[in-house]
Image (spheres, rainbow, N blue to C red):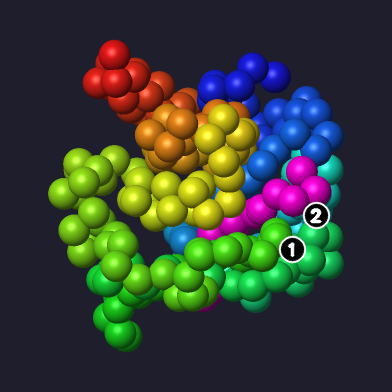
């Protein structure tokens, strides 16, 4: 597959075309599937079980394409962690769970001020503690650096750039299977890394292309 390109396609179909042991870091933020169901009722944890075969295969592909000294950062939250962790650990082998304290968030029963990141990979020298602080989410000020929020689960570039610096060297290849608004691609461009991404939603894909186009024009 071409590098420095986002593909508007199913990530499982796309990742099968990536060569073995070619990815230095996988940084990805999947949909958590815990909102409303098709009949308008609140979703339940058991609804996630339909996704189990998909994630077993996807994590198997993660393991195949990752370099021997590569790293994986897989975002989740407190509701979906119990679903993802046993699959991730069984297929890949979890090494840690990072906690991103984003400073503020929605919620009436205490605010959702943190997100979780399943981690697999080598020892990280100088990466700091497994609680990441000082990088605000959009509700706490990330828009000052990244502009207005254009995706419901958008992460600040400052956070993704930290993970990229922690786990890769300049010129290495980063994979994001759920590109969303393209933040991983933008972060790779700024950190002089290469990237491959997948985004199945056409509207999100168009947003990615526009953001990348603006980023490249500013660099020129």
Quadrant location, the C terminus:
top left
Tell me which label, 1 or 2, sits earlier in the chain.
2
The Cα atoms of the two marked residues, 1 and 2, are separated by 8 Å
- The one nearer the camera, 125 or 172, is 125
Where does the image place residue 151, in percent across and percent down from the top left? 34, 44
User: Circle 1 sits on which residue?
Assistant: 88
- The one nearer the camera, 151 or 125, is 125
Q: Residues within 10 Å of mark 1 (few under 14, many from 20)?
A: many
In this rendering, the answer to whether 79 lies above or below 18 is below
In this rendering, the answer to whether 186 lies above or below 54 is above
In the current view of this chain or complex, which residue is farthest to the front? 125
Part of the protein shown in magenta? 67-79
Q: Secondary structure at mark 1?
A: helix
Where does the image place residue 70, in percent across and percent down from the top left? 70, 49
- Residue displayed at 21% across by 64% down: 140
Where does the image place residue 116, in percent across and percent down from the top left? 51, 69
- Residue displayed at 54% across by 21% down: 5
In the current view of this chain or complex, which residue is farthest to the bottom? 109
Q: Secondary structure at mark 2?
A: helix
Disc marking residue 56: 2
- Residue displayed at 30% across by 78% down: 111
- The one nearer the camera, 96 or 10, is 96
Left or right: 140 in relation to 89: left
Q: Is residue 72 magenta?
A: yes
Of circles 1 and 2, the one toward us is 1
């Amino acid at each position: 597959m071409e590098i420095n390109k986002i593909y508007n396609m199913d990530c499982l179909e796309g990742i099968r075309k990536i060569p073995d042991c070619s990815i230095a870091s996988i940084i990805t933020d999947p949909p958590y599937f815990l909102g409303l169901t098709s009949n308008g009722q609140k979703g339940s944890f058991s609804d996630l079980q339909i996704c189990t075969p998909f994630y077993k295969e996807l994590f198997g592909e993660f393991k195949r394409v990752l370099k021997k000294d590569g790293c994986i950062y897989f975002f989740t939250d407190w509701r979906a962690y119990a679903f993802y962790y046993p699959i991730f650990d069984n297929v890949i082998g979890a090494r840690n769970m990072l906690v991103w304290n984003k400073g503020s968030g929605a919620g009436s029963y205490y605010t959702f001020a943190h997100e979780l990141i399943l981690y697999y990979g080598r020892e990280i020298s100088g990466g700091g503690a497994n609680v990441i602080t000082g990088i605000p989410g959009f509700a706490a000020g990330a828009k000052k650096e990244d502009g207005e929020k254009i995706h419901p689960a958008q992460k600040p570039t400052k956070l993704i750039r930290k993970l990229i610096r922690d786990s890769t060297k300049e010129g290495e290849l980063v994979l994001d299977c759920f590109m969303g608004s393209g933040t991983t691609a933008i972060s790779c461009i700024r950190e002089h890394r290469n990237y491959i991404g997948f985004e199945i939603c056409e509207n999100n894909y168009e947003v990615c292309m526009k953001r990348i186009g603006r980023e490249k024009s500013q660099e020129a």
